[in-house]
Image (spheres, coloured by chain):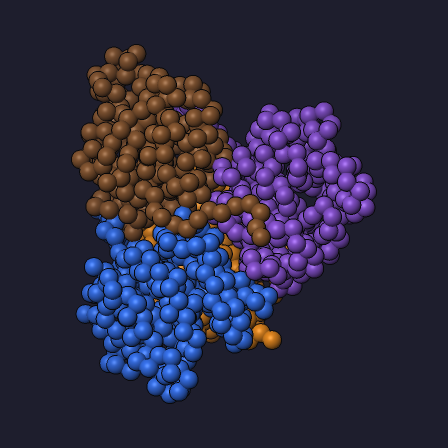
Chain colours: A orange, B brown, C purple, D blue
Amino acid sequence: MVAVTIWNEFRHEREDDAVAAVYPDGIHEALADVLATDHEVRTATLDEPDHGLTDDVLESTDVLLWWGHEAHDEVADDVAGRVQERVLEGMGFLPLHSSHYAKPFKRLMGTTCSLQYREDGGTERLWVVDPGHPIADGLGESIELRKTEMYGEPFDVPEPDRQVFISWFEGGEVFRSGCCYRRGKGRIFYFRPGHETYPIYENEAVRRVLHNAVDWAAPTEGSPRTFGERA
Amino acid sequence: MVAVTIWNEFRHEREDDAVAAVYPDGIHEALADVLATDHEVRTATLDEPDHGLTDDVLESTDVLLWWGHEAHDEVADDVAGRVQERVLEGMGFLPLHSSHYAKPFKRLMGTTCSLQYREDGGTERLWVVDPGHPIADGLGESIELRKTEMYGEPFDVPEPDRQVFISWFEGGEVFRSGCCYRRGKGRIFYFRPGHETYPIYENEAVRRVLHNAVDWAAPTEGSPRTFGERA
Amino acid sequence: MVAVTIWNEFRHEREDDAVAAVYPDGIHEALADVLATDHEVRTATLDEPDHGLTDDVLESTDVLLWWGHEAHDEVADDVAGRVQERVLEGMGFLPLHSSHYAKPFKRLMGTTCSLQYREDGGTERLWVVDPGHPIADGLGESIELRKTEMYGEPFDVPEPDRQVFISWFEGGEVFRSGCCYRRGKGRIFYFRPGHETYPIYENEAVRRVLHNAVDWAAPTEGSPRTFGERA
Amino acid sequence: MVAVTIWNEFRHEREDDAVAAVYPDGIHEALADVLATDHEVRTATLDEPDHGLTDDVLESTDVLLWWGHEAHDEVADDVAGRVQERVLEGMGFLPLHSSHYAKPFKRLMGTTCSLQYREDGGTERLWVVDPGHPIADGLGESIELRKTEMYGEPFDVPEPDRQVFISWFEGGEVFRSGCCYRRGKGRIFYFRPGHETYPIYENEAVRRVLHNAVDWAAPTEGSPRTFGERA
C-alpha cells in the first residue's frame, strides 16, 4: 500500500461557514475518504507543530497531497525546503488547485506559477490529451465539472514533461490542468480541479484521477544518486 | 531573405464555387500575398509535374508551407519522402490546418495525426501558452476567430517540443493548435488555423503568426550530420 | 503476466559460425530465456509467414522486442505498418541494438535513425542519467560492458521523452543508449546493448534492464482514442 | 547589439597565484574580451555593492553570464531572487562550469544541481548531439579540450528542453554539458566548459559556443504575461 499524507491549510473550513458546509471536517478529511479505500492515509495541517510535516512523517510518506489557498506564506521555509528535498529523493507530490502557489511547488518549478482566474461558477471540461497516460486510466474522453472557478493561461510553469489534461472553460479560456513533472527521483502532478465551496472531489472521475495519480507518483526503486568527488 | 515555397493541393478552389469565392487564385496565392512582403516566395501545386516539388525546388527552399485537404493520397510517396528528407537536412516545414493528414507530416510524426472535428462555424480562441516563444512575437494574449471549423482532442501526434497555442472552441472542445517539433536539423510548426471557405488568412494576428513561423523555421547553420563507419 | 513477443531476423546465427557459437538457437531464444522467468514469451522470425507477426500474434502481444541487423529491407511494408499501428494502440516496443534501423522504429521516429559506429571490441560504460526511472530499478550508477561495438553521436532520432542511459566508449565517443518515447498509447524504449558475437545478453545488469523495460512498456488502460467527426 | 553582463565571483583570481597566472584581470575580463567583438559588454563582481547587479543593471541586461565557484553562499538571496525574476521576464542566463551551484540557477531549476567531479586534468570531448541547434552553429562534430576537470553524471537537473552537448571524459565518465531551458520568457543555457586554471576560454570552438549562446539567449518580443483576476 502506498503511504499517502494529505496536507491541508485547514483555515477557511474553520473561518467560513460556506466552506464548512461543504467540508465540515476539512478538505483533508474529504480527500482522505477518497483515498483511504486502497491507500494508507494520514493527514497533516498548517497549525500543527512543523505543520504536521516532521522529518519522521516526510520520511515515511510515499506520496504527499497538498492543499493551500490563503496562507501559503505561513508555511515555514525550512518545511518547504524539506518537502522539496524529499521530492528530489523520490517522494511523489500532488499539489491541488490553488496549491499552484504552494511554496514547495514554486521551489520545485523555479517559476512564479502565476495564472489568470475568475470566480464565476461556470462549467469546466477537462480533455484528456494523452490517452495513453496511466493517470487517464478508466476515464472517458473528458471530465465535465458543472460549477467551478476558472483558471486561465498563461500558466507560468516549466513546459510539463507530459500534459495529461487541458481544460476548457465556459467563459472562453483554456488551462493546462494536469501537468506531470519529474524532479530528482520524484514525480510531481499538478491537478487543477478542487475548490473550497464547489464539491469537486465528489465527482467520480476526479476521484479516479486522484487514485491514478497517487499510484503514478509513488516512488520506484531506481538507481543511486551519488554526488561529489569521485576517485 | 528566407526562400519560401507554398505548396497547395489547389483542387477545391477549382471545383467548388464557395471556395473559389474566397480564394479565387487558390489558397497558395493568398498565402503568397501574406508572405511576399518580406520573403522570397514561390508556389507549387499538386497537379504540376512532381507536384511542383522537384529536387531543385526543394534544394532551394528554406521553409515549405503545406496546404492539403481532400487529395492527400494523391501525393506521390517519393515526393513525400523527399520532403521528409529535406526537413531532416534542415528545411523548415509548416503544415497548415487539414494538412495534419499530409503525407510528409505523418511520416515525420510517426503517428496517425488523427483528431476530432466539427464543421460548425463557431468561434475559436487561440491562447498563447508560451509567451516567450518567437512565434508569439507581437501577439496579444489570444487570437479570436469568429467563424471556423472545430478541431478537438485527442490529437494523435508526439508530445510537441514546445506548445505555443492551445485553442478554445465555442462548442466545448480544446485543441493543441500550434505545435513545434525538431526532426533532424529541421524545424516543424503545425498551425491549425485556416479553412477553405472561412477567410482565416485575412486575420492580422494569423498573418503575424505565419511571418513569425517562417522566421522561426528557417534553417540555421548547425554542425555536420556525419553518419556511418568511423575510423 | 506480460505477453512478450521476441522478434528476430534469425539469419546470421544460421549463416555465420562465429554468431552460431554465441547464439546457437538464435538471439530470440537467448532473449526468451532471459524473460521467460516472469513473462509469457513467444518468438517470431523473419522467414516465417508474415514474419511470424500475424494479426493474431500482434493483437495478443503486450510488448514486442525486435532484433534486426542485415535484412531490415526484407521486412514487408505491411507488417512494419501493422507493428506501427499496434504500438499507437498501446503495444510496447523495444528495438535492440542494430534495430535502430528497423522499419517499424524508423516509421515511428520519422527520422533516419542513423548514427556512427566502429566494430572495435572496446569497453562501453552506460551511465544512468535518470536515476528515478523505473528502467533503472536495481542498477548501480553505470553498467560496464568489456567488449562491444561502438555506436556514436549524432544519433538521428527525435529528442527522447526521457533519456535513461548515456554510453561512454573507450575510443572517445558517447551515445544516447537508452531512449524512451511515447507514440499514440504505446511506449517505446530503444536500448543499444546487444551484439551478434559479443555475449552482451549474459550480463546481469543488461538482463535487469530488459526485465524493467518490459514492465515499463506494458500497456496501461488509459482513455479512449476517439477520432473523426463529432456531433 | 545584445547587452551582455558578465558576472564573476572574482575571488580566486585575487587569492590564488595559479589562477591569477591564467586570468590576471579575472575570468570576467577574459570572457568580456571574447564577447566584446560583437556585443555590448559590462561586468559585475561579488564584492561590488549589490554584487554589481542593481535593478538598473539587470533591467538593461539582455543576457547575463555567471561565473561562481567558492562563494556561492555569499550571493545575497534578494539578488539571486531578482536575477531569477528577470530571467522569467525574458533575460537570457548562461551559468558556466561551477555555476551549476549558483543560487539563481538552483532556484530556476528547483533541484540540487549536484554532480560528480574529479580534478584530474584529463581530456574532455564535447559531442554535438543536436546538430540543428543554433548553439552548434559553425562547430565540427565535437570539441576537444586537452586538460580539464571532470564532471560526471548523474547531474541533478530537470530534463533539459534541448540537449546540445554531451561530454566524454578520458577517465570513463559522461556529462550533459550543454543544456537548454526556458523558464518564463527567459532562455537558460548551462555550459560546462571553463576552469579557473585551465585556459578553456582560449579555445576557439568554446568561444564560438559563447557567441552562439548569447545570440540564442537574447530576449525576443513574445506576447504579454498577464496574470491575476480576469473580468
Residue drawn at 20 percent across, 33 percent down: B36
Q: Is residue C139 visible?
A: no
- In the image, residue C12 sits, relative to residue D105, either above or below, namely above
Residue C35 place in picture, x, y as percent: 74, 46
Residue drawn at 40 percent across, 19 percent down: B71
Frontmost residue, C136 versus A5: C136
- In the image, residue C222 sits, relative to residue B123, either above or below, namely below
Task: Tell whether A45 sits left or right of C174.
Answer: left
Residue drawn at 25 percent across, 64 percent down: D37
Frontmost residue, A177 versus C28: C28
Residue D32 place in picture, x, y as percent: 28, 70
Residue drawn at 23 percent across, 40 percent down: B1
Within the image, what quadrant is residue C220 found in? top right
Within the image, what quadrant is residue C48 found in? top right
**Residue farthest to the front, as pictured:** B231
**Image quadrant containing the N terminus of chain C:** top right
Give the mark count. 0
Residue A44 place in picture, x, y as percent: 49, 65
Task: Tell whether D86 sits left or right of D168.
Answer: left
Q: Is residue D130 visible?
A: yes
Residue C106 place in picture, x, y as percent: 55, 37
Within the image, what quadrant is residue B73 found in? top left
Frontmost residue, A126 versus D138: D138
Task: Tell whether A54 sits left or right of C102.
Answer: left
**Image quadrant containing the C terminus of chain C:** top left
- In the image, residue B13 sits, relative to residue C9, either above or below, namely above
